[in-house]
Amino acid sequence: MRMSDGLVRASGAVTVVRGEEELFQRTGHLFATVTDIACAANDLASWVAVRKSDELAAATAGRLGEMRIRKIYRSGLLLDSVSTQELARRRDRLGAQIRITTEEINETILLDRRVVILAGDLSAGRRSYSVITQPETVQGVRSLFETAWRSATDLAVYDAQVAEIRQLAPAVLDLLSRGVKDEAAARTLGLGVRTYRRRVAELMAALGAGSRFQAGIRARELGLV
């Protein structure tokens, strides 16, 4: 659903807004009392991070110990050391549980199992968001989140799994982007061909890519190349 800037359209228990500022105006107050936050995100940026977070920090100050915070992120983030450190910082600062998935996810926030915020498309530099309170729909989204949560991997565990490929990722991505044959790429990195191909497969898995071409696209989206 697309709408002109600033237009808000409510239909039953679904409200669609344009832009992070308007979304915050409609939902920011919920953070003053929320006790359960579940979030799925493709990257570190979110509507919370886009704006100055002073108001949110004030709303949740002193309440972190009372809040259950769960976040799922895409695995490609852990191929970047800076992003990996930031995820760990958020986990420790917020007392959050963070898991990593290689599956496609839609950016979603669930508040106290009663409100769902779904990120939509970008239009004219602004993203649309659907704010949903309809119980059946909220329950459906919650069920999808719980399924994704159960199949995802704890941040510390996944971090250990990809630590080696993270170091090789820039060089491997560069070789792939230049179309260097596996034998020559392996020699460049001082690896056997089988080891190189295994590293490429691990890199593709971390990026959630089904092909080397798709891996290149995902890597560019994440700023890795």
Image (spheres, helix red, strand yellow):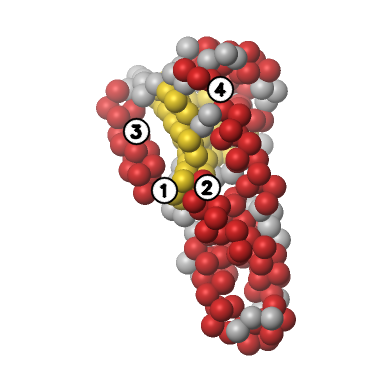
Q: Residue at x 34, y 38 (%)?
A: 146
Q: Give the crowd class for mark 2: few <14, some 14-19, many >=20 residues within 10 Å.
A: few
Dot 1: what SS? loop
Q: Amino acid at mark 3?
A: Arg
CA gap, disc 3 and disc 4: 20 Å
CA gap, disc 2 and disc 4: 32 Å
Where does label 3 land, which residue? Answer: 142
User: Looking at the image, which is closer to me, 148 or 15?
Assistant: 148
Residue 137 x %, y %: 31, 29
Dot 4: what SS? helix
User: Looking at the image, which is closer to me, 6 or 111?
Assistant: 111
Q: Amino acid at mark 2?
A: Ala
CA gap, disc 2 and disc 3: 24 Å
Dot 3: what SS? helix
Name the front one of labels 1 and 3. 1
Where does label 2 land, which residue? Answer: 156
Q: Amino acid at mark 4?
A: Leu
Where does label 4 land, which residue? Answer: 23
| Residue 106 seen by the camera | yes
First in sequence, mark 2 or 3: give its number.
Answer: 3
Q: Residue at x 56, y 59 (%)?
A: 162
- Which of the 4 image quadrants contains residue 94? top right
Asked if the residue at tag 4 contacts the one at tag 3, i.e. Cβ–Cβ closer than 8 Å, the answer is: no
Q: Give the crowd class for mark 3: few <14, some 14-19, many >=20 residues within 10 Å.
A: many
Residue 171 x %, y %: 70, 69
Where does label 1 land, which residue? Answer: 152
Name the front one of labels 2 and 1. 2
Q: As drawn, is 175 to the left or to the right of 150?
A: right
User: Residue extending furthest bottom?
Assistant: 183
Name the front one of labels 2 and 3. 2
Dot 2: what SS? helix
First in sequence, mark 1 or 4: give its number.
Answer: 4
